Amino acid sequence: MDKLVIEGGNPLSGTIRIHGAKNAALPILAASLLAEGVHSLHNVPKLLDIQTMLDILGRLGCRGVHEEDTVTIDTSLVSTSHVPEDLMRQMRSSIFLMGPLLSRFGEVTIYQPGGCAIGERKIDLHLQGLQALGAEVVESNGRVFCRAGRLKGNDIHLDYPSVGATENIMMAAAKAEGTTTITGAAREPEIQDLQNFLNKMGAHIIGAGTDTITIQGVEKLTPCVYEVIPDRIVAGTVMIAAAATRGSVTLTGTNAGHLSSLIHVLRRAGVQITVCNDIINISCLGRPKAVERVITSPYPSFPTDLQSQVMVLLSLADGFSVIKETVFEGRFKHVEEMARMGADISIDLNRAFIRGVQRLYGATVEATDLRAGAALVIAGLAAQGTTIVEQAHHIDRGYDGIEKLFQKLGARIIRKVPAPGPFEIL
């Protein structure tokens, strides 16, 4: 597996543009199945998860090309609603295909999805939402089969604001008969982006960004040209890295409104942040301050996807900080790796107690999941000496060449690809 080698201790400096949002592009790619024809999607990052989704769509019959940041995809030749098990087990977001395929073909077969091992992520809310729209669901040995005639609108309440379930129901209901109302809906910016994409195809949806979304079903949707929003988690990762290395960085093509909870925490830590339109300036010329309490929770609260990264910053802060993780129980796997680098962090159930240290030291560490991997890269950038982050493929699921991203800001980071073994067939 690839590894990242980092020579730390160099403050980040410069200007960088943030690429498109993985968590917006994936459901949008799935939603393209709802309108037969050629779609042109811009600002789509080249990530492992994006490639997996394109591979799945290709196996279903789509013809797609990903050149630079544009995906051109023809969905007119899709001939099956059976999602291949081998690809589905590689990525959690493959679950997004349920709603569009059920709507288009009247049936869909999927398997329990894979992805990062960060805690239990059931698909119950997805299935309950589709059942409320009239689908029959049969589960057996990890296989899920759904069948329905034309779906019918209904009032659906989510007991938890699941992003994936909200989006799957939106896609399934877009061409359903009648009106669907989702209460208790997730409010993430990526849901607003999906609403905007569906509406550009001809759907009638309002309310994304609030906890109540209303979908008036339509008979037909048509392909369109669309640009994906910037990735707020990538932006947040760069902002935290700038602060942790005591650097000064400018981000362009961002939406500060999507980052308000992070900006609040960083300012409490003494980081200087200014915002002007889609430009964010971050600088931290001294040691950051401890933050008494950070609690992860669904948007617009502090995102779980930035918890491990901000923990790196707080591990270098002056004082004692506490992070409470309320979303995924497996989100502290990076703590043991950070301890190898000199961090002073103890865990009690879903709380991390962080006593800031003067500096971190380079070590060989392992990325156990996407965001933990990004956190270890930040730690390596801030540390004294050489850090090697193994299992870099996890990071590639959400960052379009993370080493190139930080190289543009002056970081000394390279990727090492292992040479083929003596018995490997080329």
Image (spheres, grey):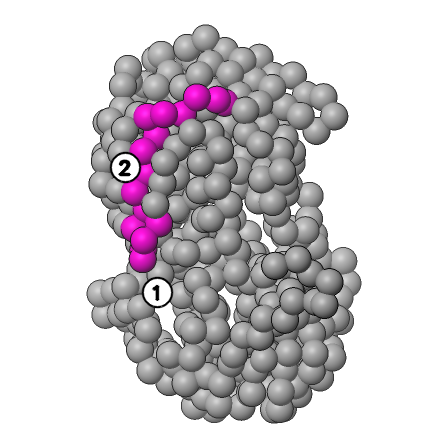
Q: Which residue is mark 1?
A: 18
For discs 1 and 2, the disc positioned in front in the rendered view = 2
**Image x and y of residue 64, in percent:** 36, 40
Q: Residue at x 48, y 73 (%)?
A: 403
Give the spatial CA distance, label 1 vs label 2. Answer: 23 Å
Q: Which residue is mark 2?
A: 39
65 with respect to 81 (left or right): left
**Is residue 418 visible in the rendered structure shown here?**
yes
Other residues around mark 1 within 10 Å, as few (<14) / some (14–19) / many (≥20): many
Q: Is residue 185 left or right of residue 370?
A: left
Q: Quadrant of residue 309?
A: bottom right
| Extreme residue in the top direction | 149
Residue at the (32%, 53%) spot, across then down: 67
* Element class at badge 2: strand
Total numbered circles: 2
The kind of residue tagged 1 is: Ile
Looking at this view, is 143 or 416 the one in front? 416
In percent of the image, x 26 and y 42: which residue is there? 40
**Judging from the image, what secondary structure is the residue with disc 1 in?**
loop
Q: Tell me: residue 142, above or below residue 362.
A: above
Range of residues picked out in magenta: 66-81
**Foreground residue among 214 and 147:** 147
Q: Amino acid at mark 2?
A: His
User: Against 384, is 181 above or below?
Assistant: above
Residue 233 part of the magenta-drawn span: no
